[in-house]
Image (cartoon, helix red, strand yellow):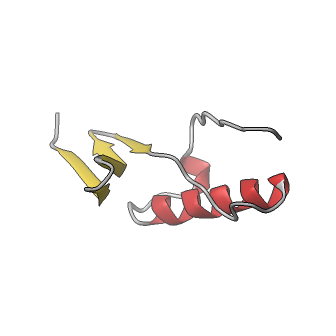
């Protein structure tokens, strides 16, 4: 297996936003438009996800699975 590459690291909260492990890329939570309507928040989260994927040469078409957590939708 190739090395594990961590990027978008947050030292304060001790997490990596992007982890590349072999042929897999794992993206941590994505948020956007906080405090706006649910539709705007979802669109903002997709925009954030697309930006993160772009940093490792991928697009939204590369996504296989998503876990979505909602509060009070």
Q: Quadrant of residue 3?
A: top left
The quarter of the picture where the C terminus appears is top right
Total residue callouts: 0
Does 2 sit above or below residue 53?
Answer: above
Front residue of 57/41: it is 41
Does 65 sit above or below residue 33?
Answer: above
Q: Identify which residue is drawn at 65% across, 57% down.
A: 46
Image location of residue 37, percent across then percent down: 84, 58
- Tell me: 52 left or right of 34: left
The quarter of the picture where the N terminus appears is top left
Q: Identify which residue is drawn at 31% across, 57% down.
A: 10
Image location of residue 69, percent across then percent down: 66, 36
Q: Quadrant of residue 71?
A: top right
- Tell me: 10 left or right of 34: left
Image location of residue 14, percent across then percent down: 28, 47
Front residue of 63/28: it is 28
Front residue of 49/73: it is 73
Q: Identify which residue is drawn at 33% across, 50% down.
A: 13
């Amino acid at each position: 297996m190739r090395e594990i590459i961590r990027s978008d690291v947050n030292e304060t909260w001790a997490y990596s936003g992007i982890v590349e492990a072999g042929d897999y890329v794992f993206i941590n939570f994505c948020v956007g438009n906080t405090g706006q309507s649910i539709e705007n928040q979802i669109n903002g989260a997709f925009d954030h996800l697309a930006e993160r994927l772009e940093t490792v040469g991928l697009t939204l078409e590369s996504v296989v699975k998503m876990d979505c957590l909602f509060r009070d939708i």
